[in-house]
Image: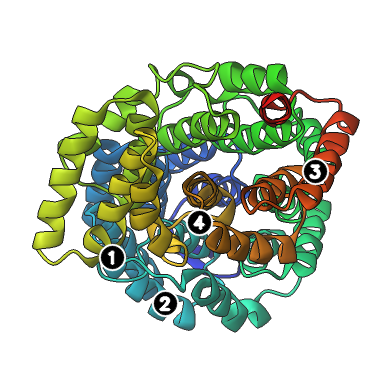
Amino acid sequence: MSTLDRYDLPITTSSPEAADHYIRGVDLVLAQQYGPEDALTAAVEADEGFAAAHVALGMVRMMRGAAPQSRESMRQAHDTAGGVSKRERQQIEIIDLWVRGEGHKAVARLREHLAEYPRDCMMIRLAQRLFIRGCSSVGSGDANFPPVYYALLSSISPAYGEDWAFYGQYAWANHEIGLIDEGMRLAQRSLDMRPDNAVAAHSIAHVHFETGDPSGGADFLGTWLGTLDKRADYRVHLSWHQALFELALGRQQKVESWYYEEIEPSLRRGRLASLAEGASLLWRMQVYSGAAPTLPWDVVCPLAAPAAEKAGVAFGDAHAALALAGSGDHDALGRMLDCLQAEAGKGNALAGEVMVPLVQGLDAFAHEDYDSAVKHLGPLEDQIVRIGGSHAQREVFEDTILEAYLRAGEFDAAEAMLTERLSRRSTPRDTFWLGRLEAGRGADDEAQGRFRDAEEAWQTADGSFPELDILRRMARN
């Protein structure tokens, strides 16, 4: 027996109660809200033979990093798959590939699946997850994944009409390829239709980040987060965005409050997200100030330790390298490099072409050997996208490359990076970096003008910026 879900797709269950729980659970997945696991568990309790609910549970559990529970859900999905529809069988196949660590195969099947069933919106949520984790190619990462994901969603957009969940997903695809205004329009429309949609709120935060508007971003997200259940896993990632806004505004105490109250790794479950958010925030604070961050590395570093013993997902390993380099654990960083070189020797192009030089460059940067850092990191400017993640997540590596150029006196390369960045948006920090570039070239008058502009903007922002201390030290010298 089957009924229809919210997208008029048949779901195989004999229980109307189970179907209601399932539909509610999928909507909570699509909104990144708290409670999908409870709703889907209720669905399988109402109908133990409900394969689609088991597979959705497998997806939710895998998304929060609970691989053993996810595998158990997938076992139950296989055991109850007799008599289900072709679409439901394909869902089981695709999510099972992901759970087994074959994400690139899952992406290939997903693209075929969405061409056949474009309104299977839960699978679009999975597609984004796989694309940003670098699963869109076999082992080599994909420098072109944002436009590929955008093209995928564009191809199926006519199937949706006015749908809050699709608009939320499509917004992310738009702003990640630079279609900022359209990304904001879609996200705002999604939020108007479903105000608790965290996916849409996330895209609005990205638009404020990409346009250099931390004040607007902090105002929006700080207010919106007040409505989000504190138990929602996605709350931590959105709090990381809020901490970046506060950092850009120089509100050091607020950065620390967001970290300790919402982000600090012991507060949440998934290792990869905890590592990425904690390490990137602390590394930014260290690079911007030229000194150790006021927040401690000791809680983040244990999450990085497995990367020193075995190569894993590139996105996670890249952030593990930040933690190990930032905390000065060069022995572990050396072991990590050995693992990555071994992977490269087996033909892993992503390890050899991106991860090995990234680790070497971060190690050199931490040793203040900026010439070597530039040698390793410079060629990664256009390749770092291959590790996955959003642009906001990858910018920590771009900032490090730019800082390495400036510290090594590679001013032409720094200027090229800044010119491209300033073509997208301007921030006081970019202006400060431009002043350092001009000072390094001996253009003192131009440099002082940039420094005055940056200082005025920072002081207007009523924040406390470590770069102001650098400016004062430069003035004394």
* Amino acid type of the residue tagged 3 in the rendering: Gln
Question: CA–CA distance between discs 4 and 1?
Answer: 50 Å
The quadrant in which residue 330 appears is top left
Q: Which residue is mark 2?
A: 111
Chain-order first, disc 4 or disc 3: 4
User: Going 48% across and 51% down the picture, which residue do you hit?
Assistant: 401
- Between circles 2 and 1, the one closer to the viewer is 2
Chain-order first, disc 4 or disc 2: 2
Question: CA–CA distance between discs 4 and 3?
Answer: 20 Å
Q: Which residue is mark 3?
A: 448
User: Going 67% across and 74% down the picture, which residue do you hit?
Assistant: 160
Question: CA–CA distance between discs 1 and 3?
Answer: 61 Å
Q: Which residue is mark 1?
A: 93
Disc 4 crowd rating (10 Å Cα; few below 14, some 14-19, many 20+) is some
Give how far across and how far down residue 253 sits, in percent: 70, 16
Question: CA–CA distance between discs 2 and 3?
Answer: 53 Å
Disc 3 crowd rating (10 Å Cα; few below 14, some 14-19, many 20+) is some
Give how far across and how far down residue 222 sits, in percent: 77, 31
In which quadrant will I find the C terminus? top right
Determine whether 8 is above or below 257 in the image: below
